[in-house]
């Protein structure tokens, strides 16, 4: 596996301070400190789900290693493995209907 060199993402100052403020707000609300990459990746998935680009699947009965997911398109249930270190939002494909879904693990229980 090759690791590519990090390249800075160009941002306007106003965008940068808005993002800083939102990241702080997220960390205060959830009590989780997150890396920038993890934070942005999570927010992009949740945001795209909210924008309707991905269906947002329901997660229930989360255990340490797995979660029961219900597809929001076909209603089909399936079990998804959740290895240690999995972030809050995960992109999956429904095994029943092939829909692209985002599972919000923070919204389960
Ligand atoms: Zn489905």
Image (cartoon, grey):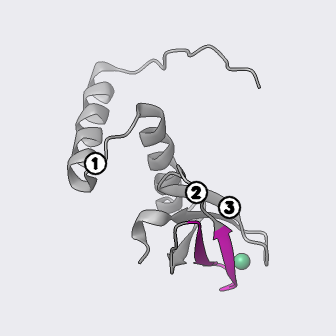
Q: Is residue 77 magenta?
A: yes
Q: How far apart are marks 1 and 3 (CA)?
A: 24 Å
Does 57 appear above or below 17?
A: below
Q: Give the range drawn in magenta.
A: 65-80
- The residue at the point 50 percent across, 51 percent down is 87
Image spot of residue 1 (x, y percent): 77, 26
Could you tell whether 48 is left or right of 12 in the image?
Answer: right
The residue beneath circle 3 is 92
Numbered label tally: 3
Where does label 1 land, which residue?
26
- Up the image or down, 64 lies above or below 38; here it is below
- Is 6 left, or right, of 28 in this rendering? right
Of residues 45 and 4, the one drawn nearer to the viewer in this rendering: 4
Find numbered disc 2 in the image and state the secondary structure of the residue it sits on. Answer: strand
Q: Indicate the quadrant where residue 11 lies.
A: top left
In the rendered image, the vertical position of residue 49 relative to residue 20, given as above or below: below
Name the image quarter holding the C terminus: bottom left
Circle 3 sits in a helix, a strand or a loop, which is it? strand
Q: Which numbered dot is residue 96? A: none
Viewer-side residue, 52 vs 2: 2
Report whether 46 appears left or right of 69: left
Q: Does the residue labelled 1 lie within 8 Å of ligand 1?
A: no
Q: Earlier in the sequence, mark 1 or mark 3?
A: 1
| Badge 2 vs badge 3, beta-carbon distance below 8 Å | yes
| Residue 92 is a magenta residue | no
Q: Residues within 10 Å of mark 2 (few under 14, many from 20)?
A: some
At a point 49% along the width and 58% down the height, the residue shown is: 51
The location of residue 36, given as percent across then percent down, is: 41, 32
Location of mark 2 (residue): 90
Secondary structure at badge 1 equals helix
| N-terminal label among 1 and 2 | 1
Q: Do the residues labelled 1 and 3 touch (CB within 8 Å)?
A: no
């Amino acid at each position: 596996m090759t690791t590519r060199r990090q390249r800075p993402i160009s941002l306007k100052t106003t965008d940068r301070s808005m993002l800083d403020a939102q990241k702080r707000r997220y960390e205060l609300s959830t009590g989780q400190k997150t890396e920038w990459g993890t934070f942005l990746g999570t927010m992009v998935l949740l945001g795209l789900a909210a924008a309707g680009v991905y269906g947002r699947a329901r997660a229930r009965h989360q255990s340490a290693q797995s979660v029961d997911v219900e597809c929001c398109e076909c209603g089909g249930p399936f079990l998804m493995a959740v290895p240690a270190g999995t972030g809050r939002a995960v992109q999956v494909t429904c095994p029943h209907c092939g829909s692209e879904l985002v599972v919000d693990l923070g919204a389960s229980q």
